[in-house]
Image (cartoon, rainbow, N blue to C red):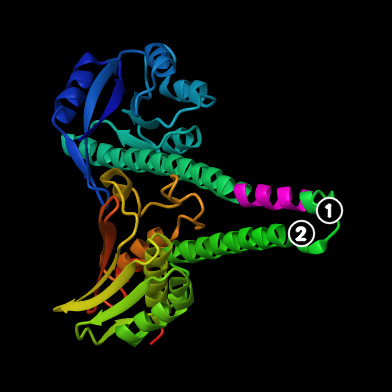
Amino acid sequence: METLRLLVTDDEADMRRAVDWALRDFTVRVPDTGTEAGLVVEQAATGEEALERVRTDAPDILLLDHKLPGISGLEVLDQLAGLQSDMLTIMITAYASIETAVIATRRGAYDFLAKPFTPEELKSTIRKAIIRVILAKQARRLAEENKQVRFQFIRVLGHELKSPLSAIDGYLQIMASHAVGEDIKAYDHAIQRCRTRVAQMRKLIADLLDMTRIESGLKNREVTRVDVAAVARNAIETMTADAAARDIRITLHDQGVGEMTADPQELEMIFNNLVSNAVKYNKDGGSVDVTLSRDGHRVIIRVSDTGIGLTKEDAAKLFRDFVRIRDARTRTILGSGLGLSIVRKLAQLYDGDASVTSEPGAGSTFTVVLNDTAGVPQASGLKPQV
């Protein structure tokens, strides 16, 4: 439970004690957040005391009497006008009038409570203020988290683009200075390396676009009945040449999964990423097994390889954005670090998930579970075009 601070400012000690008593065990459940909030009530007898306490350590809510022995509540509002604070002020007064309420609101008051008021009236007003404060706090936290995510995203993206650009620049300098002679064929290797790096950046950009479309809910989807095995065979065919070059055998095991309701492009992205990784991170002469099965309404895709494998620590972070396992075995393997993150995000659109089991040196098995009956969950915010 989150605890907020309320400062009641009134020259009548009985009034301050009555507010403290009424709100001592008062809690509010904030709608749509799962948050419950309570109050700690603090007291001030004068406007001057309230100003000092607010300036030192502002409470979340200020319950402020209009008529005070020194400066008035409205004068307190005037002096607080330049204070950078998210505190909400509620005016209380025995001289209730529309004019006073309007003046208080113009000077920054959030709400108005007229004396005499009942505990229920007090709680109703404070309930609204608590909800407003909690929602504002959560909005600020979310904004700060988004800011940190954007910073991290840009930092990692800059790093991922910097490496291939530096390599291309280095090769271009070699060619520009004729460092290996005048025979143009001597630069074939440098040209090929530049093209490889350009392809790497294109893949990164394509994956970024795919990921942002999925996360934003703006990706156009065409949901229909799709032959899952046919999509798997297409992905395998795409990687056949690369696999054959390293004597890697890819085998499809279709256990009668049949069709499912899905966007064909999304299934292609899942299979392409899984099969591509299984080949790239495999050993020469190894194998890849793509197994399709069904458990009721769940379609289960398993892609197993005989590759380099993963530690438990590496496997635990593998589905995060921009995560690539970098060591002596993988430094020459190009990738964006987004493929498996995209796979999991797509699986979640079908009320499913993606996981991996692996052992260093003994290969890995990636499992994706998709819910056939879910089709396009309403929570995803995506509109299928059937």
Marks counted in the figure total 2
Q: In which quarter of the image is the C terminus?
A: bottom left
Check whether the beta carbons of the residues at disc 1 and disc 2 lie within 8 A of each other. yes
172 drawn magenta:
yes
Q: From this view, report whether residue 83 is shown above or below residue 297.
A: above
Is residue 56 something that shows in the picture? Answer: yes
Q: Residues within 10 Å of mark 2 (few under 14, many from 20)?
A: some
Indicate the amino acid at tag 2.
Answer: Ala
Residue 181, numbered label: 1
Instruction: Find residue 126 and report its horizontal and vertical position in percent.
Output: 27, 36
Is residue 227 something that shows in the picture? Answer: no
Q: From this view, report whether residue 52 is shown above or below residue 293.
A: above
Residue at the spot of label 2: 186
Residue 370, numbered label: none
Instruction: Find residue 20 and report its horizontal and vertical position in percent.
Output: 19, 23
What residue sits 39% from the left and 81% below the top? 264
